[in-house]
Image: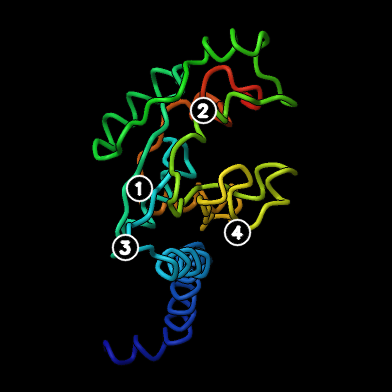
C-alpha cells in the first residue's frame, strides 16, 4: 500500500521537491549576491598588504564595522585606530569600548573647541577644516584601509578605490568597500550577525562627530 501511495502522489512529491529547491535558492540568494563583493574586497586587502601591516581607520560606523570584519577574515597584519574628535556621541564611544576593545584610540591635534576658536567660525559643509586636525592627522607613511564608499556622496564618487593623500603624499588610502551600496552594507551586517551602534536604530544616517555639518537624522 505504501508503494501505491508513493506512485499515486508522485506528481505532488515532485512539486514539493521543486518548491523546496526554489525556497532554498530564494533564501540563499542574498548570500550568493554578497559572495562577489566580499571576495573582491578581501582580495584587494590581501593583495596590497604592507610590511608594517595596515592602518585600519575605524570610526565605529556601519561601514567600519563591515571593513574590520572583512580584514579579520584574512591573515593580513593590521591595527585598527579610532580618531577621537572630542565631540563624539556617548553612544558611539560606548559601542566601540564594548565591542571593539582592541581598537586603539588616537587623540587629535586640537579639540573641536580649540579649532573653532582658532578659525573664528564653526565648520560648515563648504569649510570642513575640522577633519584635518581631528581625523586626518594620523597615519603618516602608512597604507590606510577605510570604509569610504562612492555611494555616500557626489564628492566621494569622484574618488578612487586606491589613492594617495593629497596633503600627505606618504599616505596611501585603500577603500575595499568603495563599490558597495548601503543595502549591501546592512545585508552583510545582518547576515553575519554583527553588532552596530544603536544610533542607527534611532534614525541617524551618519553617526560621526556631533558637530559634523554632514550629519543628518
Q: Earlier in the sequence, mark 3 or mark 4?
A: 3
CB atoms of marks 3 and 1 within 8 Å: no
Q: Residues within 10 Å of mark 2 (few under 14, many from 20)?
A: some
Point 59% across, 7% down: residue = 117
Comparing 26 with 49, the one in front is: 49
Element type at mark 4 = loop
- Residue 185 in the figure: left or right of residue 4: right
Quarter that holds the C terminus: top right
Element type at mark 1 = loop
Circle 2 is placed at which residue position?
208
Circle 3 is placed at which residue position?
76
Circle 1 is placed at which residue position?
193
Q: Residues within 10 Å of mark 1 (few under 14, many from 20)?
A: few
Q: Determine the CA span between mark 3 and mark 1.
A: 23 Å
Circle 4 is placed at which residue position?
161
CB atoms of marks 1 and 2 within 8 Å: no
Q: Determine the CA span between mark 2 and mark 4.
A: 22 Å
CB atoms of marks 2 and 4 within 8 Å: no
- Residue 28 in the figure: left or right of residue 105: right
Q: Earlier in the sequence, mark 3 or mark 1?
A: 3
Amino acid at each position: 500500500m505504501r508503494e501505491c501511495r508513493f506512485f499515486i502522489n508522485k506528481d505532488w512529491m515532485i512539486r514539493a521537491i521543486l518548491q523546496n529547491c526554489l525556497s532554498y535558492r530564494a533564501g540563499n540568494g542574498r548570500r550568493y549576491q554578497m559572495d562577489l563583493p566580499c571576495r573582491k574586497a578581501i582580495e584587494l586587502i590581501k593583495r596590497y598588504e604592507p610590511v608594517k601591516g595596515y592602518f585600519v581607520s575605524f570610526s565605529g560606523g556601519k561601514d567600519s564595522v563591515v571593513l574590520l570584519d572583512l580584514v579579520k577574515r584574512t591573515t593580513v597584519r593590521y591595527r585598527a585606530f579610532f580618531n577621537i574628535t572630542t565631540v563624539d556621541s556617548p553612544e558611539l564611544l560606548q559601542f566601540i569600548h564594548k565591542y571593539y576593545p582592541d581598537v586603539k584610540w588616537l587623540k587629535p591635534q586640537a579639540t573641536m573647541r580649540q579649532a573653532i576658536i582658532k578659525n573664528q567660525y564653526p565648520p560648515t559643509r563648504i569649510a570642513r577644516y575640522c577633519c584635518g586636525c581631528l581625523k586626518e592627522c594620523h597615519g603618516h607613511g602608512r597604507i590606510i584601509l577605510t570604509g569610504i564608499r562612492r555611494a555616500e556622496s557626489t564628492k566621494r564618487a569622484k574618488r578612487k578605490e586606491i589613492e594617495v593623500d593629497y596633503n600627505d603624499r606618504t599616505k596611501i588610502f585603500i577603500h575595499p568597500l568603495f563599490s558597495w551600496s548601503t543595502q549591501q552594507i546592512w545585508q552583510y551586517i545582518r547576515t553575519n550577525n554583527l553588532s552596530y551602534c544603536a544610533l542607527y536604530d534611532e534614525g541617524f544616517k551618519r553617526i560621526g562627530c556631533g558637530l559634523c555639518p554632514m550629519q543628518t537624522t
